[in-house]
Image: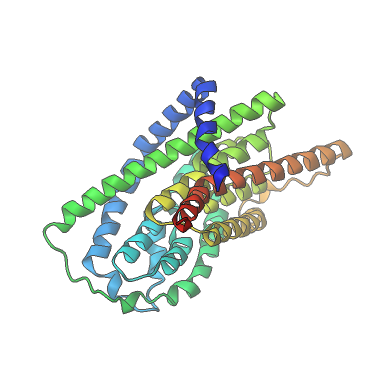
Amino acid sequence: MRIFRFVPLLLIAGLIAAPAAVSSAAASAAMLWWTRVVPSLLPYLIASSLLVRSGLLSGLSGRSAPLLLLFGALGGYPVGARLAAELRNSGQLTLSEAQTAALCANLPNPVFLLSVVAAGMFSDARAAIPLLIAIYGVALFGVIPLSRLPIGKAARSIGGLSPTDLPDAIADGVHAILNIGGCILFASVLGALLHAAGTLVFRQIDPTVHAFFLGLFEMTCGCEATAALALELRLRLALCAFFIQFGGVSVLLQAASALPLSRRVLLGKLCMALASALIAYALTPLFCPESVLPTLASGRQIVQNTATLLIVIASAAVGLLFVFVLTFGFSLRKKDERRRP
């Protein structure tokens, strides 16, 4: 589609128009990648590559295939997508089957939920309980489609580890972690550009809308901004559950660097994120009873809350449009070019 060829020009114009915002966002993203992502994720990326090379996954039966959920959760984003890509590259899964596996098994690390979000951002370890139930509870619905994947019926078997597998796995892990760093930096810069554009147009942006925009592009920054909002705890945790389950532009780009995505994957992640948000909202009062304040809102507060909700819905639509353009637009353009004689 011809419209997508103008997207790089808009990005370059934004980079030139807002250099201060771009530099600040890039520096923060680089620090986040170096201090948190590399030490926590690189070992899992290397181990996941070795796991596939060892042939262990090729021996899984249909009933044990849901172990991919466990591997994806322990590794965190985007280990689940990387595992699905490795299974596709080894000939054990087709592209459609690998996308199904990535949709179900590409999950956040529980340590991130416990230490970074609950204890770090909300200063309350109990906040991790509704997040864990909401995010992994929804992911368990993936057991049914994962159990139907023909992983144990691979056309090509992989036997044992060779002396070159470890260096190759390390090289794969380093290549993957560099791709992840680029995705995080790009998503953070893009979010900063949109925020700068919104500030220029609207002069002042509601903090809730700002946090929602951040969460759509980079979940960690979005959760940190959401935790500081003057909202009920149950609503803040519901928003965080949505951001973490969806992953945002950053996680989608990380997954796309390993495996071509589709509209079905985007819609599936969006449905999972909405379900996680509703579950977290419903469960928070059970584990954090003081989060519910028995007060009645005034008429002015109801109007303000309604206006904020409409702004959040509009910003979500704009953010999801950018996700679609960046993740799937260029692939559609390539398909159009291939069809031309």
- In the displayed image of the protein, which residue is found farthest to the right? 299
Residue occupying image coordinates x 49% and y 48%: 330
Q: How is the image coloured?
A: rainbow
In terms of image quadrants, where is residue 3? top right
Image coords of residue 10 (percent x, y): 55, 32
Residue 121 seen in this snapshot? no
User: 113 or 260, which lies in front?
Assistant: 260
| 156 relative position to 337: left or right | left
User: 212 or 287, which lies in front?
Assistant: 212
30 is higher (above) or lower (below) than 274: above
Residue occupying image coordinates x 79% and y 39%: 307
Image coords of residue 210 (percent x, y): 63, 34
| 41 relative position to 198: left or right | left
Image coords of residue 171 (percent x, y): 22, 48
User: 294 or 22, which lies in front?
Assistant: 22
316 is higher (above) or lower (below) than 335: above
Residue 225 seen in this snapshot? yes
- In the displayed image of the protein, which residue is found farthest to the left? 163
Q: Quadrant of the C terminus?
A: bottom left
User: 303 or 340, which lies in front?
Assistant: 340
- In the displayed image of the protein, which residue is found farthest to the front? 341
Residue occupying image coordinates x 63% and y 50%: 238
Residue occupying image coordinates x 50% and y 54%: 336
